[in-house]
Structures are given as structure tokens and as C-alpha cells.
Image (cartoon, coloured by chain):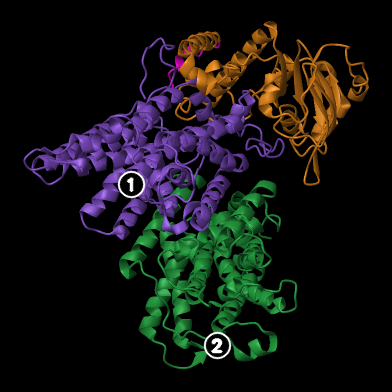
Chain colours: A orange, B purple, C green
Amino acid sequence: MSEPAAARSEEPEEAGDAVLRTENLRKTFGGLTATDDVTMEVERGTITGMIGPNGAGKSTFFNLVSGFYEPDGGSVVVNGEETTGMDPHEVTEHGLVRTFQTPRKLEGMTVREAMLVGPQRQLGESVIPLFTQPDAVAAEERQNLQRAEELLERFEITHLADQPATDISGGQLKLVELARAMLAEPDLLLLDEPVAGVNPTLANKLKAIIRELHEDGITFLIIEHDMGFIMDLADPIVVLNQGAVLMEGSPDEVKNDDRVVEAYLGGGGGD
Amino acid sequence: MADDSHEPEDDIEPEGADDGSSAEAGGNGPGGSRSAFEGGVDTSQRRVERLTNYGIAAAAVALLAGVLVGLVSPTYLLFLVSLAGMYALLSLGLNVQWGYAGLINFSVAAFFGLGAYVPALLSASGSPLPWDVSPIAGLFVAVAATVVLALAIGIPTLSLREDYLAIASLGLAEVLRLVVRNQQSWTNGTNGIGGIPLFFEGVPVLGTFASDVGTVDLGIYTLGYQFWNGLLNFAIVAGFVVVSYVVLRRVHRSPWGRVLRTIRSDEDLAEALGKNTYAFRMQAFVLGSVVAMLAGVYYSYSNYFITPGIFDPIFTFYAWIAVILGGSGSNRGALFGGVVIVAIVEGSRGLGVGASWRLFAVGALIIAVMRFRPQGVLPPRKELIWPGAHRGGETDE
Amino acid sequence: MLATLVAQPSGGVVAGAALAPGLAVGGLDYVPQLLNYFVNGLVFSAIIVLGGIGLSLVYSIADFANFAHGDTMTVGAYAGLVTLGAVGTAGPQLLALPLGFYAALLAGIAAAAVVAVATHYFIYRPLDTDSIGLLITSIGVAFVYRAVVQLQFGTDFTEYDVAVLRPVPWIEAATGITITEHELAIVLVAAVLVAALHVVLQYTTLGRTMRATADNEDLAKVSGIRTERVITSMWVIGAGLAGAGGVFLGLYNQLGPRMGFDLLLVIFAAVILGGIGSVYGAMLGGVVIGMVNRLTPVLSDVGLPIEPAYANAIAFVIMVFVLLVRPTGIAGEGVS
């Protein structure tokens, strides 16, 4: 598995079952290359980790595959369909949902309401049915509410439901975000530093929850700086450096790879 | 979407920098309404609401007493209440755009003017255009024209950054104002349009109601044509307000409204959760514009004569102060704001102080609200979940 | 109304010429006409540039769209009016303007600066809000400025007590261009002020820190630049230039309580065209928008059905177009 990523991309398309595949993905900002030629796959049913020194291009990569940045070159394929250049909400419709490193808090909403933004294609999100089929909207809303409360219960944060979404802690917000993302029923969940700034107890809880969701069939791609966390959770792990895939392999392979050590110690920008 | 505000570049965020508190950095949404929700629990909010209710009740009692002792004529009272309804329509419409979706729309006056001009052009005897459409049909044409104008302004501007949207929408509204002023052959320009019929002209019973009823002598007052006609105008604007309020109340606490409120707080988050934010913003813009336009329709049919002065940006800013004062995102706040605007506009007239003091009052009020109560007097309350879906039953607002 | 400027040009030169029917377009006799539009545009540009610099500075350093900026110009214009009344018009003249007028100009600059700094300290700074909240507050500030002017001076138009001039004869004889000494004074003084600003921005510590703050306020804070002092200087410079612009607008046109507010969007158009936050961009945008504004009669001269009354509308359409396709403006980004 420690073969260079470039070799992997030469595999025929139907080989393996990739939820996400990028080819030669490239993005520059005013002459600065943030992501240069990233070719990689996230295989269905994995928890794939993504690490790399600061400035390696991880967040840019997330923004590219989730549609927030338009790539300057290359392609993104989600669930077998090309999503290159699509708007973020269109990418989400293809089954890829992302979270943010520093989520903003939704003002004037309770945690319960904030959760209810998650479900996709809600009838009540169109204006006309609100007047023509109010009962159907109510039934749908009741169902979503129930799912939301089940998830809150599963994440052991039921007590937060009535809290204003602006009043919960950063760590709790990460849990709520994850729970809300689940309501969108993703195939692939992109988590951007899920445990950054989260206390160790909560981090362990997050880890357990991610494992549980993984067993339910969700594929994960996780950016994380916390090495202990990601090495314990993810396999395989993709290492980005200077905007390109440096290597991909199991946690042990990554740990023992000289190039990785060098990237972190060397020109990575002082992690 | 390309300019996202979460991670402008790459991994610049130092590790551990984002603990719980940093998530609040920049998260207070537009317009300083950060404490909008705290009202749900604190008692000072209840006190403010109680005071507001007392204030409104006192004003109502004073006006009614004024009628009883002969200081305020019933016709004038009707006019005042109707005018409050008109401003309430402007603020209810803007509230959909700014309060729900966070759109800084400075083109409210354009839709107010459009609502006045389209029916007038179609049905007034003084219109330079040849058609003679019934006023009620004119209302529907005005709705269609509003949708067209809202798309024309919205398509180029709604993808802009919030402060650019403010400037661009004001600019496009000014373009429309200049067109109405200068295209003599279409609009009569600054001469205005006279001979606007009554809204119910040609309608059985209602069309001749005001002259049929005749005069009723009440001792201190004689209720004549003016009064009955005022009553009909009041009925029109009241109808508009009630329908708008009911519609907006429903959409506000629907999943649709929830998406808009998410967009207002964090547009990127809404996109990441699969919501087509541009489409939602556009819907909010069009819906709000139609509501604001209704104010113009009322104005047109309750006045014999209109001029391009109705496109003056001051009407946009009246709507803004009403929404901010009432509480961004709050429908009842928008109603309240409409009443306050009338109190300022007509009150200054009643006290005999001029337009300058009125302008001063409006300006000072904006500053005072932003300084001391940025969430407004009556911010939205509690959580908004579709009625009947919640175990807890009814919710407010 | 915004159309006032175009509807009532004080000189009467441009409008009179534009209304003359049957101009031989493309013929040689149109050249002086065109030159006149340009020169008139230059005068108008000078006023827009003076307004635009401050708007741009506030946008980049205080980080909000200041809707009170136009009314700051009005404050300057009326402070000049009061001063001219007090000082009188006796004594020697420079460019057909009495020394008293130059005193009025200084008073206009000072008054606008003082009012803006006071507004910053008493209104904007205590606010606990973001740039949108400041934008909305600035509308309230604009109304208060205008209301105070109206309460003091009424709503009627008025003029500075200086003689209305004929165009300078020898320039007209030599080139066919009609420009009054007053208009020459506007362009020259504006050029001096802009040059002075350039020197301040490029060659003084204050200027360098202002540019740094404009580029990145956080960085400026971290690197020990005292931003509060920079912000105060920014208000002094921006509002002072706006005050000068207001006095010149009063001289060029006439004075009215809405004079500044009606020009605000045109100035916004210039600032956006030049690139928001870029002082030099604002200057460039001001020249372009001023020119376009005064060249609008060419459109009807060549037979297009767009009347000079649409001069501002054209500026607004350009503004929206720039926002859509190139929000950084024609001059790129940043002050430096």
C-alpha cells in the first residue's frame, strides 16, 4: 500500500469502489500553488485520514472537493459521478457532506432547530407546499424531529436540544455538527479537524461515535493534526505535502516513512 | 461561493487556536444582532415587551379619547391606521429579506414606487399609456411586474458580498427612479400621474359604497364620503397586511424559513448542508419585494395623484428603521416598527415641527437602536418549528 | 435628488451646448464641444476625487461603507458658507476668489474633520457591532448631519457670495474651451490637496502606518502600530478632503442640504470602480466617473436616446457591472 499515489490513479476506474476520486486536482491563489496535482481515492467503507504539515494543502483540498473552490485543473468524482466545478450544495446532493474547522453558531436557533437544517430535500423548504400540503410538511417535520432527537440521544447530547445554538461550547458544537451532518444521510463525510480544541474526554467520545457511524456504513475522510487521534482511528492515511500526495498507507507505514518525518521537520512551514 | 470565509488560504490556523471561544469570532451575523436570541430567557426582554404593549395601548387609548372629545376626527384616525399598515407592509417585506435572509436590500423604495406606478399607469385617466385596466387587475399586473423587477435587481446583485449588495441595490433603485423621472412619454415624468381611480371602481356595491352610504351625523362628527372612502382604503391595506402577515408567519417557521436563517448566520454552512443558497436568497428577495410593493398599491389607490417622489430612498430607510427597531427577523416587530414610523411622520406634523426634525428623529433613532438595543424592541422569540410537528405544541411568532 | 446636479448645471455651458440641435457630429466643429465636456468633466472629477478618497479610506481602515460621507461634504460646504459670511469677500483675490473664500475652504475642511472625529468617538467607537451594523448606523448619522444643516439653514438652495464669472477670455479665444477661473481654482486646489496626500502616504511614518492598517488591521495591531491614532488621522484626512469637496461642490453648483447625499452614490461608483480600499484607485475611479458623468451629453449628440439626465444612472450601472465582474476594481487591490 505504500506505493506512490500516482501509480494508484492508473488503476482502471471500475477497480475498487471509490466514494471520492480526484485526479490531478490543482488550485493556485494569485501565483501561489496551494494544491498541485492531487490524485487520490477514498475507498468506500474506510475511515481515511488526511495529514500533512501546515500549508500542505489539506483545507484547500477539502474546499475543492466540496465545491467551495473551483479547481484550476483536474477532476473530482463523487459516487461515480463527476462533480468538478459544481456548487457545494450540488456536491452535497451527490452524497458528500463536509463539516467546518471553526463552525459558526446559528443565531436565534435552538440546537434542535439547528439540527433540522440537516435533512435533504425537505418538502417544507419550498414555499408552495407550505400552503398546499401543510399536513405533509408537518408529517415530514415530525419525522425529521424524531430522527434529530434520536441522534442527539445517540450522541448523548439530548440535554442540549433546547439550548440556544449560540450558547454551547466548541466541543459540543462539533458533536452537534456531526449529528446534523448525519441527518443529511451522506455516503462520505468530510471532517475538518474534528477534535481541534476539544478536550480529551470529548475527543474520545467523538472517536467512538465516528467508529460507530462507520460501522453503520458511512465512509469518512478526516483532516486532523492530532496524530494520536488520527493514527488510532484512520486507515489508510494520506499524507499531503506541498500541495501533492506524498504517500498513502496504514498508520504504521506512515509513522515509519522517512519522507513523512522529513516533511514535518523540513520545509513544511513549522508545524 | 468561491470567497468563503472559513479558510481563506490553507491551514493557517495554528493548532489549538480554535477552542470553543474562537468559534464565536466573526459568528455574530450581520448587523449586530448577536443577542437576538437571549430574549427567550431573560426577564429584561419581558419587561421591554410589557412596556411596548403598554405604550401601544396608551397610544391607542389616547387616539380614541381624542376622537371622543373631538380632537381627532374619525377620518383622520382611519388615515393614520391605514398609513401604519402601509409602512408595516414595507417593513414586513424588508424583514423577509434582511430579517430572515440577511440581505441588505436598499431598493425597497423601488418596489414601493413600482407598486404605486404600475396600477396607476394601467388604470388612471391621467396615465400617458393607452390602457384602461380595472384597478383590481392592475394589482395582479403589479405583482407580475414586481417579480420581473425583483429578478432584474436580484440576479446581478444577490451573489454580491453583503455591503456591496447594499450599494448596488441602492444604485439600481436610483436608476429606476431616474427612468421614471425622465421617460416623460411613458410616465409623465415629474408631472406625475393624476386621475387614479378607487381600488373598487367598477365592483358592485363596493364601487359605489362610499357615495351610497351618505352622511351619518354623530353629533361632533359628520361621517361623509371622506370617511366611508377612508374605511374602504383601510379595508384594502388591512387586507394586505393580514394576508401578508399570515403568509409570512407561516413561511418564517417553516423549514424554508429555517434555511434562510441559516444562510443569514453562515451561508457556507447552508451550502455544505445541500441548500441552494442563491435560490433561497432569490425567493426571499422576490417574496419580500411583493409584500413591500403592496404598500405602493395602497398608496396609489388611496391618493388621486402620484409623483416620482415615491421612489425617494427615504422610504427605503423608513422601512429599515422600522425593521431594526422592531427587531430583525421578527414579524410582529416589523408591524410595531411600521406604527412607530407613522408616529414619527405624522406626530412631527401634528406637533407642527418640520421635516427637518422628523429627519433628525429618524437618524437619532437609528443611532440609538444600534447603540443601545441592536436586537430591536421585539426580537423573534423561542424556536421556530412547524406547528403540529413539535411535541411541545404551539410555538410563538 | 441625484438628478439635481445634471439637471441644473451652474455654468450653463454644457447643458446649453448639449441642447443645441443638429450638431455636426464627427465634424471638426464638434471638437471644441468635446473638449468642453472633458474640461467640465475634469472639474467635476476633482470634486468626486476629493469625496472618494475619504470614502475609500474609511472603507479600508474603519472597514465599513460610510453612508454619512456625502453629508460630511455638506457639513464642509455649509461651514464654508458661515465662514465666508463672517470673513467677508473684501480684500485681494486669487483666481477671482476673495481670500475670504480660501478661509472658508479651510473652515470647511476643519469643520468636516472635527465633526467626523467626534462622530467616530461618540457614535461609531462605542458600538458593539460589525461592519454592517456600522453601515446602518452611518445612515442614521447622515440623517442627523443633514437634519442639523436643514434646521440651521433651511431647505432652500443657496450660493456662496462670490461673483458669477464669465469663462476666461484668452483660453476661450485660444482653444474654444470655456472654463471659469473658479473652475480652474477647483482643479488646481484639488490637485494640490491630492499631491499633499500622496506625500503624506508615501513619505511619512503616518502615511506608511495608514497604508499598513488599510492592508491588514490585525497585522498592524500585532506589529505595534497604534491603530487608534491611525484611525483618527484617517477620519481627519478623509473628512477634511470631503469638506473641501463640499465647498467646491457648493462653488461649482450651489448649496443645498441634500447636495452631499445626492452625490454619495456617484462617489461610491468611483470608489468601487477604482477598487474599494485603494486610495489611488479612488482617485482614478473619481476621474473616470467624473468624466463619464459630464460626457453623457455626447450620447444624445450622436443620436442615442440617452439624455444627460441619465449621467448618474450610467455611473450606477458601471458600478454594478464592476462589482459583478471585477470587485477589486480597475486598479487592483490595496493602498500600496
Q: Residue at x 52, y 88 (%)?
A: C96
| Chain bearing mark 2 | C
Label 1 sits on a secondary structure element that is: loop
Q: Residue B255 at x, y = what percent?
A: 50, 20
> Considering depth in this image, is A79 or C13 the residue closer to the camera?
C13
Amino acid type, label 2: Leu
For disc 2, the marked residue is C95
> Considering depth in this image, is A257 or B143 the residue closer to the camera?
B143
Q: Residue A169 at x, y = what percent?
A: 51, 25
For disc 1, the marked residue is B303
How many numbered marks have been drawn onto this rendered protein structure?
2
Magenta-tinted stretch: A155-163
State which quadrant residue B16 falls in: top right
Reply yes or no: does residue A31 show up in magenta: no
Q: Residue C97 at x, y = what percent?
A: 50, 86
Question: Among all residues in the image, which is located at the extreme left?
Answer: B219
Reply yes or no: does residue A160 show up in magenta: yes
- Neighbourhood count class around disc 1 (C-alpha, 10 Å): few under 14, some 14–19, many 20 upward: some
Disc 1 and disc 2 in contact, CB within 8 angstroms: no
Q: Is residue B290 above or below residue A178?
A: below
